[in-house]
Amino acid sequence: MPVFLYAGDNLELSDFFNRETKAAIAFSGGVDSAYLLYAAKKYGAEVCAYYVKTQFQPEFEYIDAVKLAETVGADMKTIRLDILKNRIIAQNPENRCYLCKKTILSTITEQAAADGFKLIAEGTNASDDAGDRPGMAAVKELSVVSPLRECGLTKADVRRLSKEAGLFTWNKPSYSCLATRIMNGEQITGDKLRRIEAAECVLSEMGFSDLRVRLHGENAVLQFTDGDIEKAFSKRRDIFALLSEYFGSVAIDLKERERSE
């Protein structure tokens, strides 16, 4: 049986992986799961990273995941899943995040069990608010453990430790999946997700970062952080010309987007 550790015990990740010497990591290639995978390898655990590739993850996230796993010398398995075959998830209800997280974690649990892993760990940290993350209910229901959270490591801690470890993900902006760009209740389709991803890629190549392209019907609203919003407005003609093939109209939200942790 897995041993569950809690922040109140003042335990370190080394303690966790000294006790849990074999684990599957639900891996996204983001800051938190990247450091968790690094720590598992550092402390000698037998570990494998499982990346579930759906239409909700942009290609750059997958590329980062592969690169990070190679950097730390960890095995990584990619599971391709057509998430839109789940009609309820595609309908984009308010609990979509929970349904998607449960589907992904269930898929990982099944594959990991076939590979001989009983313990599944994921990267929720101690500063993640459970109230803002409905997917955390799925983590609890499936008995998936969150070592960073249980050991009291906040997002700031994870970034600091990642920088000290030399991980390229240490300052990577937090990134929510492409489905979050579509309003609840509006049908999610592969075409919509592809257009959103393409538009965000174009803006990234223009030098913008930590941005969002929100879809409203066939129209897009672009959200930028502090310094970038003025830059975006100055380049609005170029932006509109480049994105016009993807959307009926393009607007810039003049309210600054809060920068991700």
Image (cartoon, grey):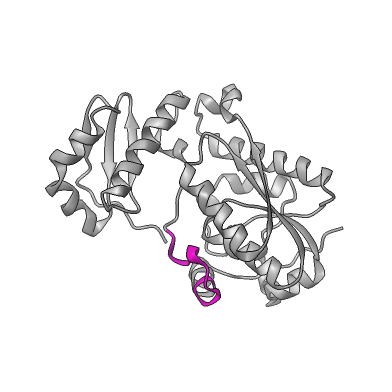
- For the point 67% across and 64% down, which residue is it? 147
Q: Quadrant of the C terminus?
A: bottom left
Q: Where 7 falls versus 23 (above or below)? A: below
**Which of these two is toward me, 188 or 44?**
44
The single residue placed furthest to the right in the displayed view is 1
Most common secondary structure along the magenta stretch:
helix
Q: Residue at x 54, y 39 (%)?
A: 97
Nearer-the-camera pick, 110 or 145: 110
In this rendering, would 244 be left or right of 10? left
Is residue 188 visible in the rendered image? The answer is no
Which residues are the magenta region?
Answer: 162-172
In this rendering, does residue 154 appear at all? yes
In the figure, residue 246 lies in which quadrant? top left
Rendering coords of residue 253 (x, y %): 22, 43
Q: In the image, residue 221 lies at what x, y percent?
A: 27, 37
Query: Nearest the camera: 208 or 16?
Result: 208
**Viewer-nearest residue: 142 or 61:** 61
State yes or no: residue 165 in magenta.
yes
Residue 202 is covered by the magenta coloring: no
- Residue, x 32% and y 37% (percent of image)? 199
Query: Which image quadrant is residue 25 in?
Result: bottom right
Q: Where does residue 238 sit, x and y in percent of width and height?
A: 16, 40
Count of labels shown? 0
Which image quarter holds the N terminus? bottom right
Q: Is residue 125 above or below residue 194?
A: below
Q: Is residue 35 left or right of residue 175?
A: right
Q: Position of residue 223 (x, y in %)?
A: 28, 45
